[in-house]
Image: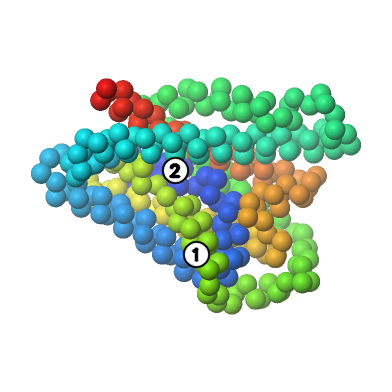
Amino acid sequence: MTVWGASAALLSTIIGGGIVGIPYAMYLSGIPVGLIINVICFALSYLSTYLFMETKKKSDVPIKTLYEFGYVTIGKSSIYYIAFLSIVQTVGFVMIYFIVFGDLLGSIVLDVFYADNPADEHKFFASRICWDIILGLALLPWILKKHLYEMKLGADIHFAAVAFFIISLFIQRFTKKREYNIDAPGPYNYWEFKFGFKEITSFSILLCAYNFSFIEFPLYHSLGPDRTPKKLLDATFVALSETIVIYVSTGLLVIYLFGSGVDPNCLVNIANEGGNVLSYLNRIFFAIVIACHVPYVFFYGKEGICIVIDEI
């Protein structure tokens, strides 16, 4: 896997459901502080990768996985602790993503085919379970892949879906007039510096959205026999640079689209557009983003289960 391929895989790991909370986080903090927090999260994420690689270099024994990292520094008990956290995290995130995916596509079917009769009981194809079954079957061959480089096509599709999602938001912002809530500050006030407890909420949302530490070691080994810490750091820098551009673009576009009515989950705002073509496109593109993101999240949990079985 090349540096560019690794950065695409890393981008697919970072950008998932967290992107829908970015506009609300930047709205809470104000755009200037939101931009600063994005830069801080960028720096902390890059620093974590650098520290991982520096510790790996200085270790007296070869470290190939996060579990070996824990074993060397703490002991055998850390293997089970890390595996437990990875499995719980994977199950939780995958459940959330399946719910979001099912609700997204179900809402499109409702708007298109059941707009005049939303109470129709015979609407299986508008149900969450229908689309979750389809997604599960579609991802089954993908999630069984052994190496990250085998999922390259998914990373490419993910990047394209994110790009189209941003482009669609951009078109929507500049082709449809928005009215801001009269009981809230106008859009120019979003550029005021704000300091308070809301910035803590904003920081926690953004920091979570930049999380990818669980995939660093598998990604490092996917770089091939000529892998070096510098290559991983280069891939991390490229992926984080793309991430901050995507997050800031999404935040600004959604804030100026929906004003003070921006929801903690901006998909709610997008879905409320109803029969708007761009609303359909945004939901479809984001559903693709979620679908391509799930295998990378599942990869870590799958590794945790295999490690526990191997240790037992």
What secondary structure is found at the residue carrying circle 2?
Answer: helix
Residue 88 in the image: above or below residue 121: below
Q: As drawn, which residue projects farthest toward the left?
A: 60
Image quarter (top left, top right, bottom left or bottom right) of the C terminus: top left
Residue 151, picture quadrant: top left
In percent of the image, x 36 and y 47: which residue is there?
A: 213
Residue 74 bears which disc, if any?
none
Q: As drawn, which residue projects farthest toward the front?
A: 77
Q: Nearer the viewer, residue 88 or 48?
A: 88
What percent of the width, then of the height, locates residue 82?
A: 32, 38
What percent of the width, then of the height, locates residue 45?
A: 37, 55
Q: Nearer the viewer, residue 140 or 182?
A: 182
Q: Residue under circle 2?
A: 13
What percent of the width, then of the height, locates residue 301?
A: 40, 33
Q: How many marks?
A: 2
What amino acid is labelled 1 in the image? Answer: Ile
